[in-house]
Structures are given as structure tokens and as C-alpha cells.
Amino acid sequence: MPYQDALARVIDEVIEPGAAGVDATATFPRRQVEALAGAGLLALTVPTTFGGGGQGLREAAYVARELGAVCGSTAMIVTMHYAATAALVAGGAKEALAEIGAGDHLSTLAFSEFGSRSHFWAPLSTAAAEGRNVRLDARKSWVTSAGEADSYVWSSRPVEADGPMTLWLVPGGTDGLSVAGPFDGLGLRGNGSAPMTAEGVRVPDGAIIGPDGGGLDLALAAVLPAFLICSASMSTGLMRRLAEETAAHLQRTQLQHLGQSLAQQIQPRAELAKLQIEADRARGLIDDTLAAVEQGRPDAQLLVLEVKAAAGEAAAAAADLALRAGGGAAFRKESPVERLFRDSRAARVMAPTTEALHDFIGRALCGLPLLGDVA
């Protein structure tokens, strides 16, 4: 069965029916994740050598988009899993890839920290050699699937090498790992984002992903494209659903004193048209970005930097339009539009934030390094 068919079945049978409950109770969608795992979708981007689906970024983006239309929390969890998997593939982490390829292993990123916040490229956490082990100490500020993932792609300062960052694979449940309580946020309420602390966490020195000190290069080359493109794809799925819900509302809602539906009114139709334009524009940018990456075009890096910022802002604008067109009905808690409105705001604050991406884009256009002092 093609992965698209498997995904559609899981969405229809498990994810969409449970989406409102996941949001209302801020509950991690364990059943939804297990259904995706059972359908082989967690292993989608793992090379076939390790038992995975052997698919690439375009296929991962498709999954994120379809999930984003029905359950933002599940979409965020899977987006982080695909980003972590990209790090493992680029770093040649064979054992971890085999576990994910077997089907039911969920991974995630543990980058952002209290000391450097959304500046993930500047970790303050430490890694110290202890014989054939490495001791990790850290205060991570936000980790998706915290306490729920089977493994974490973990950033720290290097052990000995130059460079700002080293990456490690830390198994979930390792002694010394702790989660600072449940997540109760505005949107994406079931994605399990929470602070995590590492106090004397010990992993084998072979848990390193890539070279010591080379974590930032790996993150920029492999992790960031996967995260930014899948995150943007989540936003386009959300916008598509907003357009569908708004069109349905306009068609079924009657102005009885006029004997007309809202769909027969100029202003609501105009709001719907603007919403659809935003959705199509964002999807077109993602498609061009994927083509640029696949073809190795010179503009690939710039488009990758643009795509999350553009789609995230478009989703927020589209949600505003949907709320305006839907009026009081869209404002109610039981409305999918209200949930999508809250979910649409998350892209602005997820590292790299919209403001950070704008700076990266400006630096790239001016021929400056993405990071570091430009004085």
C-alpha cells in the first residue's frame, strides 16, 4: 500500500476523530503516534538498508501537510521526528536508524536551552568524557515529545574539539533525564513540549552523531531543512483546512431575513478568496523549495530559510481571515477554526523564530554569514 493510502487511512480512522480531544485535554496523542508507526510512517524517511521506507523530504513534507490539516499536535510530533531522523541519517547512526526502521521508535530534537533560548546554535549544555562514556548536563527549555520519545537528538558543547555544538543520541528513560511537568499551551496542546533537564546523564562515547564539534554543520545541512520545510507544510495543511471549513460555513449558514446564504454575500466570499490565495501561495513556495533542494539549485538555501517564515505568517493571516468570515460560529471552542487559529500562532515562536529567519534571510542576501558577528 502506498504511504499516501496508509496515511489517509490512519487520519480517517484515528487522528481526525481524536484531534479535538487531544487539544481539549492537552494529552499526548499516543494512540495516533502508534497508528502512524504501525503504518510504517515513522520509518518513512529511513533508508531501506535499515528497513525503512527510503523516502525523502518531499514525502515527509506531504505527511506533515496532511497531518497539519487535522491535528497540529500530531503534525508537530512527526515533524520533529523527521528532523531527528535526518540528523541520524546524515550522521550515520546505524543502530538508531535500524530501530526507527523497525517501525515503532519515536525520536525528537532537544536543542533549545534556557540559557540561549531559541538560539539553538549556541548550546550551553556540557559534555565531558568519562572513560568510554560521556556525561551530559543541560537545561533544555522546550523539547517536543518530552518524556514520550524513545530517543532525543541532543545538542551540547563539544567535548574537546573546536566548534559550537556536538550532537548525541540519548535514549528516552536514561538515568538523569527529567521532564519539568506537562505542557499547557495556547496551541499544539498535545505535542508534549516541555523543559527537560539532564543531570549527570551518561551515554556511550559511540552515541555521538557526526564528529565532535561538527553538530552545527550537521544541523544546518540536514536538520534545519527537514524541520523548516515540514513545519511550513504543516502550515499549508492548516490553511487548506481553514479554507474548507470557511467555505462550508458560508454555504450552510443562512441570513433568513434576506433569504440568502453567507456564500451569497460579497464580503465573506472575499475573505474566503484571500484565505485561499494565502494557502496556494504558501504551497507554491514549498513546492519550489523542494524542487530547489532536489535539484541542488543555487537558491535552495535561501528558499529553505524563507519557507517556514513565509508559511507561518501566511497561516496566521489565513486564520484571522477565517475567524472574520466565520464570525461568532468560528470563535466558539467547539469550532475547528478556533483550534486552527491557536495552532497557527506556534510557528512564530518555534526556533528558529520568524524574526531569526528574517535575520538569516537578510544576511544571506547581503552575503554575510548566517551566524556570528557581522560588524
Image: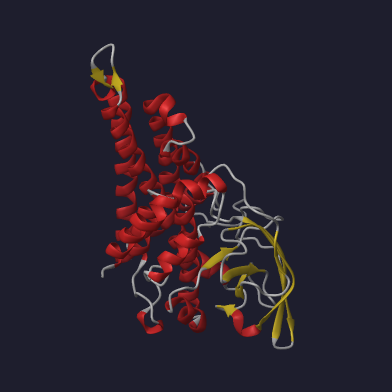
Residue 213 or residue 138, whichever sits in front: 138
Q: Is residue 305 left or right of residue 278?
A: right
Is residue 257 visible in the rendered structure shown here?
yes
Q: In this view, does 113 lie above or below 149?
A: above
Q: Quarter-wise, where is residue 59 in the image?
A: bottom left
Tell me the quadrant of the picture where the N terminus can be found.
bottom left
User: Where does the image place residue 149, in percent across and percent down from the top left?
Assistant: 56, 67
> Which one is nearer the viewer's eye here, 10 or 309?
10
Position in image of residue 312 (x %, y %): 45, 44
Residue with the most extreme top position: 257
Q: Residue at x 25, y 12 (%)?
A: 258
- The quadrant holding residue 143 is bottom right
Residue 313: percent from the left, percent from the top?
A: 44, 40
Lateral position of residue 218 relative to residue 279, left or right:
right
Residue at the spot 36% in from the left edge and 64% down from the top edge: 57
Picture coordinates of residue 358 (x, y %)?
A: 50, 46
Please identify the residue farthest to the bottom as the structure is shown.
132
Vertical placement of 70 versus 220: above or below? above
Q: Looking at the image, which residue is at 31% across and 60% down?
A: 9
Q: Residue at x 23, y 21 (%)?
A: 264
How many discs appear? 0
**Is residue 365 something that shows in the picture?**
no
**Scheme of image coloration:** secondary structure
In the picture shown, does residue 356 fall above or below 300?
above
